[in-house]
């Protein structure tokens, strides 16, 4: 089992200054290395067909690129599980004021709410943040979930097409939660049966 985790939205609570009211986390799950490899190859072919030279990133993509991307990955062998946090429902001061605690806690909750699929999994997390934060997050997850998962490592999305897939999928699901209209749910609907579960916290 190989798992790629990414987030959509910021962990801040300054809503009048642009903080996102909805925070999303998700994991793209591959049952085998062969499934991951075939999907990576499909992403490479899609990149060439689209002549897209930069990383796939949901927040920076045009509607046309999103349409082409989700059409291109619709038959790939992966599953997505996501966690949606509506921040106005959170009352913990620790989570509301300490960014690292907020992120770590919800990554742990996403992984704990896995329906058993992470048993023995190799987990890769988008390597944002400095090295101190990355080490602290890895230590925290191994302490909290180490008996269930095989290993946890950080991955640079700019160099990792499967992490870019996670970014696109989590971005689509979170966008659908922020904007519950036809435009907002468009790309989530394109994922269709690839979505295994969307869990709402709170």
Image: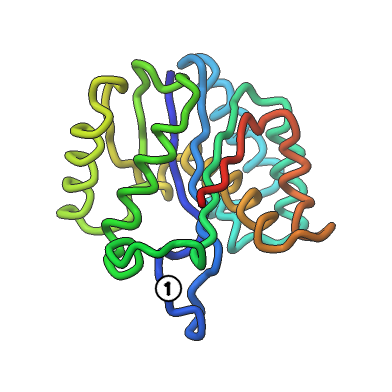
- Tell whether 139 sits left or right of 123: left
- Tell whether 94 sits left or right of 55: left
Does residue 117 lie above or below 185 as drawn? Answer: above
Residue at position x 41%, y 22% in the image: 118
Q: How many marks?
A: 1
Residue at position x 47%, y 20% in the image: 117
Q: Quadrant of the N terminus?
A: top left
Residue at position x 48%, y 74% in the image: 19
Q: Position of residue 156 (x, y in %)?
A: 36, 46
Q: Position of residue 71 (x, y in %)?
A: 76, 39
Label 1: element kind: loop
- Tell whether 182 sits left or right of 192: right
Q: How is the image coloured?
A: rainbow
Give the residue number, with chain letter if any, for mark 1. 13
Dot 1 alpha-carbon crowd within 10 angstroms: few under 14, some 14 to 19, many 20 or more: some
Q: Nearer the viewer, residue 182 or 36?
A: 182
Q: Position of residue 46 (x, y in %)?
A: 67, 38
Q: Position of residue 37 (x, y in %)?
A: 51, 22
Of all residues shown, which one is farthest toward the bottom? 16
Image quadrant assignment for residue 150? top left
Of all residues shown, which one is farthest toward the front? 91
Of all residues shown, which one is farthest toward the right? 182
Q: Nearer the viewer, residue 106 or 169?
A: 106
Does residue 72 lie above or below 13 as drawn? Answer: above
Residue at position x 41%, y 44% in the image: 159
Does residue 168 lie above or below 62 as drawn? Answer: above
Does residue 165 lie above or below 193 as drawn? Answer: below
């Amino acid at each position: 089992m190989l798992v790629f985790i990414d987030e959509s939205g910021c962990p801040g609570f300054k809503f009048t200054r642009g903080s996102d009211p909805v925070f999303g986390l998700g994991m793209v799950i591959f049952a085998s290395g062969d499934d991951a490899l075939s999907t990576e190859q499909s992403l490479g072919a899609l990149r060439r067909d689209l002549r897209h030279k930069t990383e796939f990133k949901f927040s920076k993509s045009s509607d046309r690129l999103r349409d082409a991307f989700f059409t291109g990955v619709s038959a790939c062998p992966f599953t997505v599980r996501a966690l949606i946090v509506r921040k106005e429902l959170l009352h913990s001061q620790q989570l509301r004021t300490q960014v690292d605690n907020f992120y770590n806690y919800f990554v742990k909750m996403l992984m704990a709410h896995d329906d058993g699929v992470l048993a023995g999994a190799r987990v890769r997390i988008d390597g944002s943040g400095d090295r101190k934060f990355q080490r602290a997050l890895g230590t925290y997850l191994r302490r909290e979930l180490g008996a269930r998962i095989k290993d946890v490592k950080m991955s640079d999305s700019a160099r990792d097409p499967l992490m870019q897939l996670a970014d696109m999928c989590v971005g689509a699901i979170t966008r659908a939660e922020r904007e519950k209209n036809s435009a907002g749910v468009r790309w989530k609907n394109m994922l269709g049966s690839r979505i295994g579960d969307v869990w709402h916290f709170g």
